[in-house]
Amino acid sequence: MGNLHVTKLENKKEHANYIHHLMNDLEALDLMLKEDLIEKEPIRIGAEQEFFIVDKAFFPSGNALKILEDINDDHFTTEIGNFNLEINLDPLELKTDCFSKLEHQLTTLLEKAKEVAKKHHSKIVLTGILPTLSLKHITIENMTPIKRYFVLNEAVKESRNQDFHIHIKGVDELSLIHDSVMLEGCNNSFQMHLQIHPDQFIENYNWAQAISGPVLSICTNSPMLFGKELWAETRIALFTQSVDTRANSFLLNENQSRVSFGNNWETGTVTDIFRDNISRFRSMVTSEYITDSVDMIERGEIPKLKALNLHNGTVYRWNRVCYGVGEGKPHLRIENRYIPSGPTTTDEIANMMFWVGLMLGKPSEYNDIHEKWDFKDVKSNFFSAARYGMGTQMFWDGEYISTHQLILDKLLPMAYRGLYKADVNPKDVEKYLTIIENRVKSYNGSQWLIKNFRQQSKTKTKYAAAQILTSQLYEKQELNYPVGSWNLIKENEVEVDTSTYFVKHAMSTDIFSVHKDDSLKLVKKMMTWKNIRHMPVIDEGKKLIGLITNTDIKGFSKLSIDKGVSVEEVMIKDLLTISQYESLETAKELMLNNMINCLPVVEDGKLIGLITSKDFFN
């Protein structure tokens, strides 16, 4: 969706015009391959950096367009969320010090963004999923106010004709219904591009698929969403579901999601991959097309294949095929989309060097891998890596092997050979691949985040722990030491500004509730068993309708309770409540002024937590 000027396909004429140009682009690509017009050398690399913008309290800050305007640099562009931006790095020829040059440009551009963000009282954070994200940040109101995002949202929703059901099960479980594609804004990646020789494209694409699982396992950095521990790389599950155009009936023979790893090895030519995408996924948007791609080739001009690239921009393979034109020459490349943003720029360049090294260093024994390996094993490796990260057992070359052993014994030596063969500076190769090796022996981003989140959650609510985690993630990123060398967070090095705390920071969410028809005897037992003083009462729709306190129960004799007094006869019906984003000071004043010790926390009338006087002491 890089094209800013898109509209929904509304009528037969628009559909016919778009399909004409789409088919014409396929024919033009075939023609360029046949006539040897696609660039074969030199090979180039490139990358895209997505990042979060946060406020001084490390919550998402919806000022992306203001910051973008003040940055005033064509390397920067918008993302779907108004708290995200993206940097497009310049392509570099794959040789000598290209990786250190790439990091230098990335660092320079990020510093530029940080300086501007600072003027807007904001900070930049590199991570796959921001720990402080909440449901309030993914509403349509937080969508970047640019037409193409609203067009995409409307097109996807119309295709589904139902809301999005997000269900991800890890250590915790997330299940929610959402009404827009804004969940996509939770995902930030470091997208890596490698130009591929056109004659070897299918062979190289299949190899890129084969190594995806091991590469992802060492790079995971997104283990949490909305305070829940899910997958080591939760982005993989979340992005798949957040823009899924399939309804439950799987209409239009879309038997795989628009975000996918694929179902089979590729064969034929690169054009066949595009044909498969077009066959599986219907076009949702269009743009303006003036020139005929085939006519351009016949006139000796190089077409940009705008219709094909627009369709390709709405199909999100984790290894995506890309066609582009640089300096008047057409080329093909693979875009690696599964690597998360962060945790540091040094880590990201190390990830990229590892992947590129493996792409270049493939031994001849892995030629024609599609004839030797079962694709389901490769796909299984990828999703196992997304779920378990470095704890994955890979099925590699006919046997199970730990990720640690596979990377250290087989893949790192392979990457070294590939990079040396490409004439990459040995000093850079040693620097960045040593980062990968050290990460295998210590921990990656996901492991560091989870260890610290669990530790902080022992004494704080998950919301407060996530805020501390994000602040420390930011502090360590600023030093740019690789994540494998980071120490765990110590209590005495964390400074917390509690003046910014909301009710959500202190409220209890692991709460028990009862219904109005339950017996008071049961409630009394539950309160004794769980050592709690307040019991909310909810109806069948989960809405709060009352509250029972210890004091209320003490007013009844044991005889009355044993006779079967119901909750409805005892509960307080006229309740004071509060929202989760009110300040703690407001909650405190409400309790003091009304001489109560508990405030139910509600959203749309439904109970989501309790805050008590005891929570203020905690």
Image (cartoon, rainbow, N blue to C red):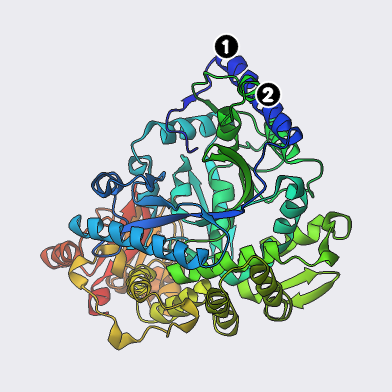
As drawn, 208 above or below 165: below
Which residue appears farthest toward the front when viewing the image?
300
User: In the image, what residue occupies the spot 81% across and 44% down?
Assistant: 267
Q: Quadrant of residue 26?
A: top right
- Callout 2: few (<14), some (14-19), or many (20+) C-alpha neighbours within 10 Å? some
**Amino acid residing under circle 1:** Lys
- In percent of width and height, residue 516 lies at 41, 55
- First reached walking from the N terminus: tag 2 or tag 1: 1
597 relative to 17 in the view: left or right: left
Seen from the viewer's position, the closer of residues 539 and 470 is 470
User: Residue 387: in sight, yes or no?
Assistant: no
The residue that mark 1 highlights is 13
The location of residue 265, given as percent across then percent down, is 79, 50
**In this view of the protein, can residue 214 be seen by the observer?**
yes
Badge 1 marks a residue whose secondary structure is helix
Q: Secondary structure at mark 2?
A: helix
Q: Which residue is mark 2?
A: 23
Q: Position of residue 326 (x, y in %)?
A: 53, 41
x 80%, y 57%: residue: 376
Q: Which of the 4 image quadrants contains residue 424?
A: bottom right
Label 2, label 1: how many angstroms apart (C-alpha)?
A: 15 Å
The image shows a total of numbered marks equal to 2
Query: Which residue is painted at 13% across and 65% down in the image?
Result: 589
Give amino acid for label 2. Met
> Is residue 187 shown left or right of residue 74?
right
Depth order, front residue of 120/110: 110
Q: Is residue 47 above or below residue 425?
A: above
Mark identifier at residue 465:
none
Where is residue 492, by image quadrant?
bottom left
Q: For the residues carrying marks 2 and 1, which lies nearer the camera in this image?
A: 2
